[in-house]
Image: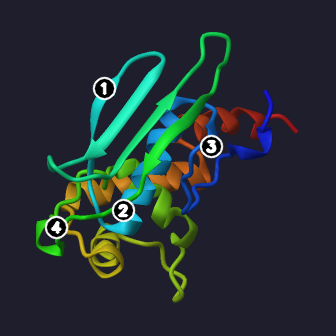
């Protein structure tokens, strides 16, 4: 594939750069969602189809943008252009972050599901963490969905766990 050292694996990073490869459009959008959450800005999809993804800053007249393409013969997406300039004033940053999906938040909190005092993280802990870490407010329902997703990443889904039970019956 040439340049496979740039291929992003499963772990989200803080870096996005021109020439970077992603296994899928979903992986690319996930990384950009993490990136936006960490850098406190929001983006929207300007154009998306099977071969192209074009993201722009949420508000018009700002310069941040990302464009990635998938070649016909390839299965991966490559970042073709990335303008990482934030010209927006801080007053335009919203407290209800559009990239703060239950999936993104779940991935953020999954490594720290177990609290220091030994108890499992609760939705209200996630709400407090998001406000402290990123300055965003999330609803209890989103915190609950995030917790459920984080638990599934860490401990498997209910269905997978139930299927494992049959193997315990045979000794």
Q: Quadrant of residue 5?
A: top right
Residue 37's disc number: 2
Q: In the image, what residue occupies the spot 47% across and 73% down?
A: 120
Vertical position of residue 57 compared to residue 96: above or below: above
Discs 4, 3 touching: Cβ within 8 Å: no
For the residue labelled by badge 2, is the local secondary structure a helix, a strand or a loop? helix
Q: Earlier in the sequence, mark 1 or mark 3?
A: 3
Quarter of the picture holding the N terminus? top right
Residue 47's disc number: 1
Q: Which residue is mark 4?
A: 95
Of badges 2 and 1, nearer the viewer stands: 1
Q: Between residue 38 and residue 6, name the one nearer to us.
A: 6
Q: Between residue 6 and residue 165, name the one nearer to us.
A: 6
Q: Which residue is mark 3?
A: 20
Of badges 4 and 1, nearer the viewer stands: 1
How much space separates mark 4 and mark 3, taking CA atoms?
A: 30 Å
Q: Earlier in the sequence, mark 2 or mark 3?
A: 3
Q: Earlier in the sequence, mark 2 or mark 4?
A: 2
How much space separates mark 2 and mark 1, taking CA atoms?
A: 21 Å
């Amino acid at each position: 594939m040439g340049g496979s050292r740039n291929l992003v694996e499963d772990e989200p990073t803080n870096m996005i750069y021109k020439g970077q490869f992603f296994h899928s459009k979903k992986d690319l959008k996930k990384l950009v969602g993490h990136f936006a959450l960490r850098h406190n800005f929001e983006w929207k999809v300007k154009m998306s189809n099977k071969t192209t993804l074009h993201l722009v800053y949420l508000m018009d007249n700002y310069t941040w943008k990302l464009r990635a393409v998938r070649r016909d013969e390839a299965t991966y997406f490559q970042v073709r252009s990335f303008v990482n300039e934030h010209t927006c004033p801080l007053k335009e940053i919203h407290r209800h972050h559009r990239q703060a999906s239950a999936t993104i938040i779940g991935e953020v909190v999954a490594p720290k599901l177990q609290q220091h005092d030994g108890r499992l993280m609760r939705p209200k802990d996630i709400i407090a963490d998001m406000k402290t870490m990123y300055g965003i407010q999330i609803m209890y329902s989103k915190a609950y969905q995030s917790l459920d997703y984080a638990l599934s990443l860490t401990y498997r889904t209910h269905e997978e766990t139930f299927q494992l039970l049959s193997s315990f019956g045979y000794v």
